[in-house]
Amino acid sequence: MADRHVLLLLRHAQAVDQSVGMRDHDRPLTVFGIEQARAVGNAVRSRGLQIDRALCSTALRTRQTWSALGLDADVEFNDALYNAGSDTLLEELWLLEESVGTAMIIGHGPGVPALASQLAGPGSDPHAVEVVNSRYPTATLTEFRIDAPWSELQQAALTWLRLGD
């Protein structure tokens, strides 16, 4: 069966450390983080991927990551994705319309890395799975090929990994 959907999971790029008086939600990207996000955007374009729908946390660092990617896609900034766990991220994916061929989530650790590990099923690249299970630094991107409707997503084939460090 041909791939029905593609999912990209991205942990936001490097942000400044939290300081006194700064809310975690308001932490911006570092200069290096902006460079990381631009490199991820270039990698997505080089793979020939066209994102139909991006789901992005409302945190400043995720919104800035989205902006620096430079990708042209329909984006939804969603409070539910801010520091969301893997279950919440998966529930948001279940709500996608079937017309969405390629989706991207831009979120946070530990939820995004946990979801990547949880989804990696049959047909996954063994090396990519090993890396995801050991580390998922900022600006890491994973690509999954899915042979099920969004509403039934439980596992997928982890086919590509781009480490952000």
Image (spheres, rainbow, N blue to C red):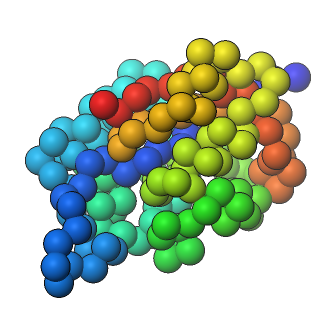
Q: Which residue is at the front of the view, 105 or 112?
A: 112
Q: Where in the figure is residue 25, as x and y percent of width and height?
A: 33, 74
76 in relation to 118, above or below: below
Image point (46%, 38%), residue name: 136
Q: Which residue is at the front of the view, 50 or 105?
A: 105
Q: Is residue 70 visible?
A: no
93 in relation to 25, above or below: above
The number of numbered badges drawn on the structure is: 0
Q: Is residue 16 visible?
A: yes
Image point (46%, 22%), residue name: 47
Q: Where in the figure is residue 9, as x and y percent of width and height?
A: 54, 44
159 relative position to 39: left or right: right
Q: Which residue is at the front of the view, 98 or 165?
A: 165
Q: Residue furthest bottom?
A: 21
31 in relation to 97, above or below: above
Which quadrant does the C terminus fall into?
A: top left
Image point (65%, 32%), residue name: 144
Q: Where in the figure is residue 113, as x and y percent of width and height?
A: 55, 45
Q: Where in the figure is residue 140, as x and y percent of width and height?
A: 42, 37
Which quadrant does the N terminus fall into?
A: top right
165 relative position to 7: left or right: left
Image point (27%, 79%), residue name: 23
